[in-house]
Amino acid sequence: MATTNLGRIGFVLKGDWSAGTYKNLDIVFHTGATWGCQVLTTTEEPGVGSDWVKLLEESSLINDNSVTLLTTWSSSKIDTDLGTKVARTSSTGSAALPSGTDAQRDVSPVAGYTRHNATGGVLETYLTSWQKVFTASDATTAATADKLVMRGATGTVKAADGVDADDVATMSQIVSQDYVDGTLVITPATDADITLTSEQALFGRIVLNTGAWTTARNIIVPDAEKMRVVKVAGTYAATVKTAAGSGVVVISGQEAALYCDGTNVDYQTKRELNAAGDAPIFACRAWVNFDGTGTVAIRASGNVSSITDNGTSDYTVNFTTAMADADYAVVSSGWTDIVAVNTTSVRPRNAAAYQTSSIRLISSSTAGGTTTGSDFSLINVAIFR
């Protein structure tokens, strides 16, 4: 009886591809995919030419038809692929996350598990417990190019990055987050103190608008160590404090760097300067160290543009940036190498010497009971306001 050679009628699993000769219907694994030989014989590398056809991507799910077709695959390879891959609609589409009720959650979840909760209609992730990430019914959204404002449908505040804050906040304020510089903008919706949620307290800068406030009130921050900048853009001052500790009053138009030590809130500057007590700190607005003999010469200065020599013992210190008014304080001193001088003095020339753009000073020395004006080789001046 005559016979006919049908050749191969089933796939032959060859494992990982390596250089060599393969036959029609040989199956190999290469470059994260499964390939089938579609020519009689080949030495070609899968993916280089047309001798091999890609059967499965490593990130794809195996459907019933392909499982039936590839019956010669090793069961361990199929089990590994099925157990570790997440379905997707396409390479540019969406991941198809598992979906189930509360009762169908993993028995022993670990941090990072993420799923769709069909009971609440929310996306949830597991940290130390299951946390709701976001639900469309929870919030109405108003968006601009760089700012997102969210208000809970039930009257609860939602942090603008989607974190649910309805367990700790009520609609005592409307919160918007500026994504450009990480600013939390608060506009009070009621005439009451504002207590920051733990999420809101993470922001490094807070801007307060007037909103519904009719008087100065408090911003209560968590009693945890944190440095933040607070700007009062509204009409009324705000005392930034913890619930039980002391705080700092930030007046309208002021922007202050504050530090909470876990109990009290104070100026960050005082902390950096190791300044104790409740007294505020005021900065020097201009200073200069200069030689007033011969041609006047500035040794070092801050916010001082020049010194005008008005004659013997008479100088005008000119400010680079003018003072807000002429009600500032002047601290001055000087030294001269004139022999037999008992005392020296550097002081404002008169009341008219105080100008917003300058201060006029005279220097004098006393010897043997006689005071005379003289140029000093060392004069120091500092302005405070």
Image (cartoon, rainbow, N blue to C red):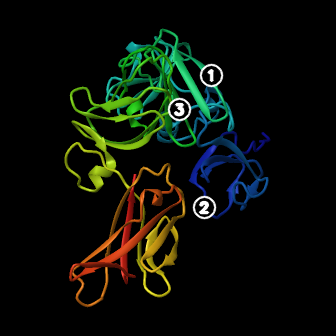
Q: Which amino acid does label 1 sit on?
A: Ala
Graded by Cα atoms within 10 Å as few (under 14), some (14 to 19) or many (20 or more), the crowding at tag 2 reads: some
Q: Which amino acid does label 3 sit on?
A: Gln
Residue labelled with disc 1: 142
Marker disc for residue 131: none
**Residue sitting nearer the eye, 174 or 240:** 240
Mark 2 or mark 3: whose residue is earlier in sequence: 2
**Residue sitting nearer the eye, 153 or 262:** 262
Give residue 346's position: percent from left, percent from top: 34, 71
Give residue 149's position: percent from left, percent from top: 56, 24
Which element carries disc 3, helix, strand or loop? strand
Residue labelled with disc 2: 18
Residue labelled with disc 3: 177
**Mark 2 or 1, which is nearer the eye?**
1
325 to 253, vertically: above or below: below
Instruction: Identify the residue at horizontal 68%, vertical 41% (top origin).
Output: 55
Give residue 222's position: percent from left, percent from top: 30, 31
Give residue 365's position: percent from left, percent from top: 30, 78
Q: What residue type is labelled 2?
A: Ser
Picture quadrant of residue 68 = top right
| Farthest top residue in view | 154
Graded by Cα atoms within 10 Å as few (under 14), some (14 to 19) or many (20 or more), the crowding at tag 1 reads: few
| Farthest bottom residue in view | 339
Q: Give the side of residue 237 with respect to residue 357, left or right.
A: left
325 to 95, vertically: above or below: below
Q: How far apart are marks 1 and 3 (CA)?
A: 12 Å
Instruction: Identify the residue at horizontal 20%, vertical 49% (top origin).
Output: 276
Picture quadrant of residue 69 = top right
Which element carries disc 2, helix, strand or loop? loop
